[in-house]
Image (spheres, rainbow, N blue to C red):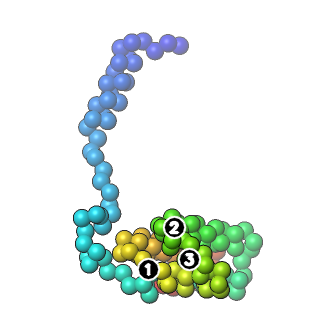
Amino acid sequence: MAINFPKWLAVLATILALLLLMPVTTSAATFGFHTPSQAIYASAASLVTTYPSFSDLDLTPLQRQRLQSVLQRRNKEIQAVLDISQRDTLRHQIHSGHSFNQALLSLELQPEQQHLIKAIEQLTSLKLKALLVKYSVPSVSN
């Protein structure tokens, strides 16, 4: 079944018109390179969220695995925000017995990094709340 030339040309013209007339989407980020660092207010204490101990909850192994994967994803996303020296400091703090949250608070973060980490924490909190609601467990408090 061959597509004849006029139909093919009409489809191509339609696609081209849609691409050219489609509105340009912009980033919804509230900060940029032109924003002064004083405009971003994020204290280090409010950066991290304390999550409940999931070992106390009555969860199946699959439910525990899903909650753990959300937290592991959070850790990877936060480490992606940090530079090499900050990652080394974080790793050293964790190996010396500090929790992830304590180690994160000990870092000297730029305002942009604080903003990104706070956003990652908020997203993680929402994901955990959704999973805990799905499993009918009392939710995480900020």
Q: Is residue 60 visible?
A: yes
Comes first in the chain, label 3 or label 1: 3
Q: Look at mark 3 in the image and give the residue it sits on.
A: 90
Q: Please provide percent x and percent y for residue 40.
A: 30, 76
Q: Residue at x 75, y 72 (%)?
A: 61
Question: Which amino acid type is shown beneath numbered disc 2?
Answer: Ile
Q: What count of labels does the image hold?
A: 3
Say above or below: 53 vs 32: below
Q: Is residue 133 visible?
A: no
Within 10 Å of disc 2 (Cα), the crowding (few <14, some 14-19, many 20+) is few
Question: Which amino acid type is shown beneath numbered disc 1?
Answer: Glu
Element marked by disc 3: helix
Q: Residue at x 38, y 85 (%)?
A: 43
Q: Camera-side residue: 134 or 141?
A: 141
Element marked by disc 2: helix
Say above or below: 28 vs 57: above
Within 10 Å of disc 1 (Cα), the crowding (few <14, some 14-19, many 20+) is few
Q: Please provide percent x and percent y for residue 29.
A: 33, 63
Marks 2 and 3: CB-CB under 8 Å?
A: no
Q: Is residue 84 left or right of residue 39?
A: right
* CA–CA distance in space, label 2 to label 1: 13 Å
Q: Is residue 10 left or right of residue 4?
A: left
Q: Is residue 29 left or right of residue 90?
A: left
Q: Look at mark 1 in the image and give the residue it sits on.
A: 108
Question: Which amino acid type is shown beneath numbered disc 3?
Answer: Leu
Q: Look at mark 2 in the image and give the residue it sits on.
A: 84
Comes first in the chain, label 2 or label 3: 2
Image-quadrant location for residue 51 = bottom right
* CA–CA distance in space, label 3 to label 1: 11 Å
Q: Please provide percent x and percent y for residue 119.
A: 43, 71
Q: Residue at x 72, y 68 (%)?
A: 62
Marks 2 and 1: CB-CB under 8 Å?
A: no
